[in-house]
Amino acid sequence: MRISTYKTLTLVAAAAATLAAAPAHAGKTLDSIKARGQVICGVNTGLAGFSAADSAGKWTGLDVDVCRAIAAATLGDAEKVKYVPLNAQQRFTALQSGEIDVLSRNTTFSLTRDASLGLHNTVVTYYDGQGFMVPVKSKIKSAKQLKGQTVCVQSGTTTEKNLTDYSKGNALGIKPVVFEQLEATENAYFTGRCIAYTTDASGLASTRNKTAKVPADHLILPELISKEPLGPMVRRGDDEWFAIVKWTIFGLLEAEEYGITQANVDSLKASSTDPVVKRILGTSEDTGKLLGLDKDWMGRAIKATGNYGEIFERNVGTKSVLGMPRGVNNLWNKGGLMYAFPVR
Ligand SMILES: N[C@@H](CCC(=O)N[C@@H](CS)C(=O)NCC(=O)O)C(=O)O
């Protein structure tokens, strides 16, 4: 009896060890992506710097680059993405129903969303916080001066809830004016239906610089009233796909940390002797195999989009139209919060 229990345990342990060393099974999401030859990415309907389509239908932005990096890693081509524009209300249903493979759209990670939607938070791609914008001519300089005022806000967002909390917590009696669509919310603010507009600070910068007739006529108030860690979400029930999305983002962050750029990735692939760089680029160990991908998964992603720092600067950084400082979105060893788990 004892011997047979021991033998069984030994067999189980041996099987577990074999499984641990084996390449990952691709997973059903990756299988269907490969079969259709496209990653279907849920994005914003139009938020300059994060995801917006130009008149020719070309999508750009930080959230779009995450989709492109995933497509490069999984399908070998960053162009193989179908973008599905989703408003705040539609975004989670689209992911739950399988209409999209990944939601890469200024979405805040929170306990309720994590625990009740059947979805997983992956990795933060932009640390944000909620702010307010007012017309300069209103003379308002602080959110505390919004007592009894109307504030335009979009429904189906954390923004709406934070506004209520902030108003209650500071006894401000703010009157929210709620809209389902971004365009309607922005229009209401620009036509003076509300004295202020509230959303993530990145969204305020985007609206001010891309939608306002005269950006200088609008002031973003200094207060940030919440934490808005934004990042892509995936469906529960496909751990392999969850891992691919997570590690592609970690890979982009590690690439920045170790100096791998869009411009030098090919030469580093050919001649780098740095063990970390070699591992990320698949020229020593094959980390791709463990994810159901090939050796060059990360090299291709970096070649397509650049590392995280390059993605940030190109789309939202100080030299871009949005002009956002790197701030807390800098790497952990440069005073920021961006800390990738090691790609090894
Ligand atoms: N990060 C917040 C807010 C995200 C959000 O949807 N913001 C609005 C205002 S910037 C937006 O992107 N709207 C675009 C749309 O619904 O089409 C959340 O996850 O709830």
Image (tube, grey):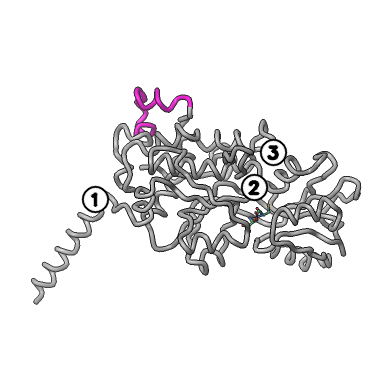
Element on which disc 2 rests: loop
Task: Kindly identify the residue that appears in the image at 50 percent across and 35 percent down.
Answer: 305
Q: Is residue 171 left or right of residue 65?
A: right
Identity of the amino acid at label 2?
Gly
Q: Is mark 2 within 8 Å of ligand 1?
A: yes
The residue singled out by tag 3 in the image is: 322
Image: magenta residue range: 263-279
The residue singled out by tag 1 in the image is: 21
Q: Is residue 231 visible?
A: no
Task: Kindly identify the residue that appears in the image at 44 percent across and 46 percent down.
Answer: 341
Q: Is residue 221 left or right of residue 265?
A: right
Identity of the amino acid at label 1?
Ala
Furthest residue in direction bottom, as rendered = 1
Q: Is residue 105 left or right of residue 267?
A: right
Contact, mark 3 vs mark 1 (Cβ under 8 Å): no
Looking at marks 2 and 3 on the same chain, the residue that comes earlier in the sequence is marked by: 2
- Distance from disc 2 to disc 3, alpha carbons, whole Å, reads 14 Å
Q: Where on the image, by quarter, is ligand 1?
A: bottom right
Residue 336 position in % (x across, y down): 59, 42
Q: Main secondary structure of the magenta part?
A: helix
Contact, mark 2 vs mark 1 (Cβ under 8 Å): no
Which sits in the foreground, 109 or 210? 210
> For residue 46, which numbered disc appears in the image?
2
> In front of the other: label 2 or label 3?
2
Residue 66 position in % (x across, y down): 51, 44
Looking at the image, is 258 positioned above or below residue 10?
above
- Distance from disc 2 to disc 1, alpha carbons, whole Å, reads 43 Å
Does 134 appear in magenta? no
